[in-house]
Amino acid sequence: MMKLIGGLLVILATSWLGFTFAGRVRDRPKQLRQLRSYLAILKTEIEYGTRPLAEACANIASQEETAVSRLFQASADQLLKGDGSSTYECFRRAIEQEWQRTALQQSEQTVLLQLCQVLGSSDRQDQAHHLTMACNQLELEENRAREEQDRYEKMYKTMGVLTGVLLVILMI
């Protein structure tokens, strides 16, 4: 009886790991799409709006509660602190603070950090241009993420379950 319960727990644990990895692979394209959408809104705010950058970020974050929107809320919070930090420093701290909660990868973080070097430090046209470039780069990353999702999501789920079954067989 104990072996049966132990075996079941091993299978459940490895299956949970497999489904967790599959969930991250599944969430990445969705989060990239959200990030591109939020950056497009930010571009519109910069081009046509009169709100300060912190208020624009807070407005974007208030639209829905997601891991990506928390990046914008953390950015707004950092900008509103008023501790004399540069815009880039505020965004960098916010990204460091919230990045682990997303399914996004290092390549997307690099794109955002490069974009943040321009935000608040150049004219509207230049910022809009860099936002467009960042959206284009993120679109390429989203396409790659979809390919990875198609390739790896089912594999992670299957490997999680089968690894558990293999471990149970080896323990018997």
Image: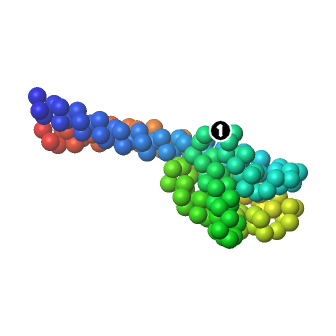
Please tell me how many numbered marks the rendered image carries. 1
Residue, x 57% and y 46% (percent of image)?
67
User: Where is mark 1, residue-wise?
Assistant: 64
Kindly give the residue lying farthest to the top in the view shown: 1
| In the rendered image, the vertical position of residue 80 relative to residue 121, given as above or below | above
Residue occupying image coordinates x 64% and y 56%: 77
User: In terms of image quadrants, where is residue 83?
Assistant: bottom right
Instruction: Please determine whether, in this image, residue 146 is positioned above or below residue 118.
Output: above
Residue 82 image offset from top left, x and y in percent: 68, 65
Q: Is residue 151 left or right of residue 33?
A: left
Left or right: 54, with 18 as reference point: right
Q: Is residue 103 visible?
A: yes
The residue at the point 23 percent across, 36 percent down is: 9
Whole-percent x, y for residue 7 in the image: 19, 35
Residue 90: horizontal and vertical position, in percent? 64, 64
Q: Callout 1, which amino acid?
A: Glu
Quadrant of the rendering where the N terminus is positioned = top left
Quadrant housing residue 64? top right
Q: Quadrant of the C terminus?
A: top left
